[in-house]
Amino acid sequence: MKAERGLTIERMVELAGVSRASFYRYDADAAETPDGDMELRDAIQRIALEWPCYGRPRITAALRRQGCVVNPKRVYRLLREDNLLCIRKRKFVVTTDSNRKRRVYPSLVEQMTLSNINQLWVADITYTRCTWRSSSMPFRGA
């Protein structure tokens, strides 16, 4: 391969200050083509800004309603690359009643001096959300 003025590849590489492998790796056609995802990214960003709680499934459905033929995996990749993934806040359930009218008993543990095993037992009631099923569907616990 020679240039128009008769330069060899070796001379062109030397003048450009690049390696021979870089010369062969360079693709002039790829450098000129713009990113094919730019229009899709723009549409995704518009939907994500309008509906901040939308995730991959809803954004994919909205794009398809607009006429885009798009794969959910591609939408997920673009959302991840653009840092637009939806992070949902967990619902906080208040289980403690601070305004109770009944007497609060003092802790007896602080007054005890333990000298042997099985002198003090402690229990904790932790709130666990349960979903109840109809009687026709058997319950399978965790």
Image (cartoon, rainbow, N blue to C red):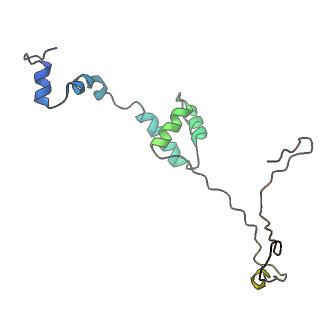
Q: Residue furthest left?
A: 5
- Extreme residue in the top direction: 1
Left or right of 139: which side holds 56?
A: left
Please state which of residues 138 and 82 is positioned toward the viewer in this rendering. Answer: 138
Q: Residue at x 51, y 33 (%)?
A: 74
**Horizontal placement of 95 versus 87: left or right?**
right
* Residue sitting nearer the eye, 8 or 86: 8
Which residue in the rendered view is the most extreme toward the front?
116
Residue 86 lies, in percent from the top left, at: 56, 48
105 and 116: which one is in front?
116
> Height in image: 107 above or below 48?
below
In the rendered image, is residue 44 in sight? no
Picture coordinates of residue 56, whole percent (x, y): 57, 40
Q: The N terminus appears in which quarter of the rendering?
A: top left
In the image, residue 43 lies at what x, y percent?
A: 48, 38
In this rendering, the answer to whether 34 lies above or below 97 is: above
| Residue sticking out furthest to the bottom | 111
In the image, residue 3 lies at what x, y percent?
12, 17
Q: Residue at x 77, y 58 (%)?
A: 128
Q: Quick check: 84 above or below 69?
A: below
- 2 to the left or right of 112: left
Q: Residue at x 80, y 78 (%)?
A: 100
Residue at (77% x, 85% y) in the render: 111
